[in-house]
Image (cartoon, grey):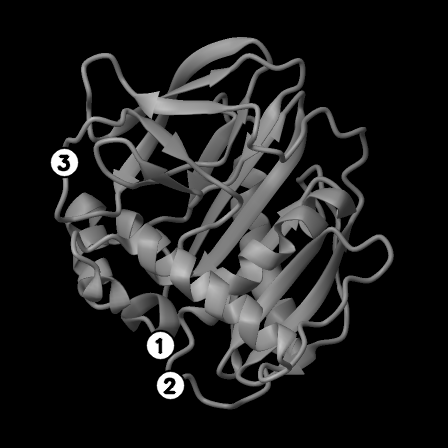
Amino acid sequence: MKGTTMQIHIGQGFPVAPVTFFPVWTHSGGRRRFTTSLDQLRIAEMPEAQAPYLLVENPGKRNVFVAEGQLFEGGFQDRMALRSSIIPARSVGEIAVACVEVGRWGGEAREHTMEIRRASEFVRAGWGAGGQAEVWDRISRTDAVGSATTSYAEVRRDIARQWAFDRSMMTLPPWPPLLPGQSGVLIGVGGYPMRLEIFSDPATLREHYTALGESIWVDLHDAPMEVTPGRRARRMVRRIEPLLAEQDDHPDPWSITGADSRYDVGRLKHGGLPVHIRASDRSHPVIRAGG
């Protein structure tokens, strides 16, 4: 792909209900210098607790990748990561977050628990559309209103369990298997591309594939049962190419461009190489209205 460190190749779409999965291959190069295991991280409230930030400690020997939209449960309230990050080995720092639990602030526990589980595109995109107030408004339009503290993370955990059970009982159609060398996926919903995610390598995609599938399924609701044509998927890639090119010399490891245009593109780089790319079509009905 001209002007970027990645060349993107889109494969044939695989329809599953209203969702169409397009496999993505890239030529990013380089060896992965991080793990996706969150077990070695300690996430806690800041010494002087602040809703927009959490303290993150990595006492381990390996860097840890945390994806944008990652959910953190516990502490004074549940949160959502606002950017993809590499947490360096043997480091202490902070991570920018949004609150995803409207009705609680406080308690005895300061630490957070987590597994690889991410906010849906509808909720995640709320931050760019209007900040914390918009995130809360979007959560109020989800099943989280049934939680005692309107905890989106709690409801997502329950949905993930139900999703896994339905898949085990074969009441949901199977997700397409990952193909050799595949490191990304473009997802269409209701006939139109919605999100493109690319990782540095096939292993990282594999380790995030279930969480990605869950986060998409939550948003479907009444999405039209239409297959997304390949030409629309390829058109989305062509249109985000200039936005990716703008990020090549960006000094921040995590950069977002196109927030005022149709496509919102975030990219994380580490050691000069792309680790995670997320591109979303802000005009897609699911992102605007949650399905």
In the image, residue 245 sits, relative to residue 24, either above or below, namely above
The quadrant in which residue 284 appears is: bottom left
Q: Which residue is mark 2?
A: 222
Q: Viewer-proximal residue, 86 or 143?
A: 143
- Identify the residue shown where x is 60% and y is 41%: 276
Marks 2 and 3, how far apart in space?
Answer: 34 Å
Farthest residue in the bottom direction?
Answer: 225
Residue 204: x percent and y percent?
69, 43
Q: Is 251 rendered above or below residue 162? A: above
Q: Which residue is mark 1?
A: 291
Q: CA distance from mark 1 to mark 3?
A: 30 Å
Asked whether residue 196 is in view, the answer is: no
Q: Amino acid at mark 1?
A: Gly
User: Which mark sits nearer the N-terminus, 1 or 3?
Assistant: 3
Residue 105 is marked as 3
| Amino acid type, mark 3 | Trp
> At x 53% / y 83%, what residue is drawn?
18
Percent position of residue 96, x then y: 33, 29
Amino acid of disc 2 = Asp
Q: Secondary structure at mark 2?
A: loop
